[in-house]
Every structure is written in C-alpha cells, then in structure tokens.
Image (spheres, grey):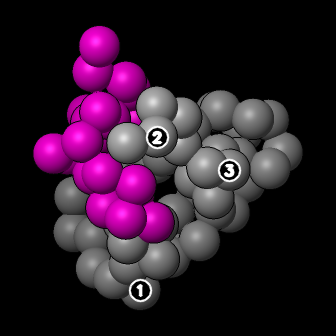
C-alpha cells in the first residue's frame, strides 16, 4: 500500500492537508483548507479520494479534519 497520499487532498494554494469540515457535512458541502481558506472540493469527492487511498483502515487517518500517517 502507498505510504503517501496523492495530491488530490493537498491544498493547491498552501500545500497542507488540513480540511475545515463542518459538523453537518453532506456529500455536497464545499470544503475549504483550514490553513488558508482555499476551496478544496465537495466533501463527497474528497472523502471518496481519501477512502480510495486506504481511508481510516489504511496507513492514514483523519482526525478533526487533519489527515495524518498512522506510523
């Protein structure tokens, strides 16, 4: 399994992977970078990308909008 996420979840503006995810999120909720506020995509698209790369059951986990490597 890959040990690095692709750039689909990385902010194109500042390079961080820190998402501002509201409590009442739906597949269509626009998600912004917590660091700089840039639009990253809809929650449904971002979640699918994360899950295709292992999601919570792979080497990465998402906690409070931040994606971190488990090891």
Q: Looking at the image, which is closer to me, 4 or 38? A: 4
Task: Give the magenta part as a residue range.
Answer: 49-71
The residue positioned 53% from the left and 34% from the top of the image is 4
- Disc 1: which residue: 28
- Disc 2: which residue: 2
For the C terminus, the image quarter is top left
Q: Position of residue 44 (x, y in %)?
A: 38, 78
Q: Position of residue 14 (x, y in %)?
A: 79, 35
Among numbered discs 1 and 2, the one appearing first in the sequence: 2
Q: Nearer the viewer, mark 1 or mark 2?
A: 2
* Residue 65 visible in the displayed image: no
Q: Position of residue 29 (x, y in %)?
A: 42, 77
Was residue 21 drawn as part of the magenta stretch in this picture? no
Between the residue at mark 1 and the residue at mark 3, the CA separation in whole angstroms equals: 21 Å
The residue positioned 40% from the left and 55% from the top of the image is 53
Q: Nearer the viewer, mark 3 or mark 2?
A: 2
């Amino acid at each position: 399994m890959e040990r690095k996420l692709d750039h689909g979840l990385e902010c194109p503006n500042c390079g961080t992977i820190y998402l501002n995810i509201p409590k009442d999120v739906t597949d269509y909720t626009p998600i912004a970078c917590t660091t700089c506020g840039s639009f990253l995509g809809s929650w449904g698209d971002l979640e699918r990308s994360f899950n295709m790369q292992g999601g919570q059951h792979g080497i990465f986990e998402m906690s409070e909008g931040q994606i971190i490597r488990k090891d």
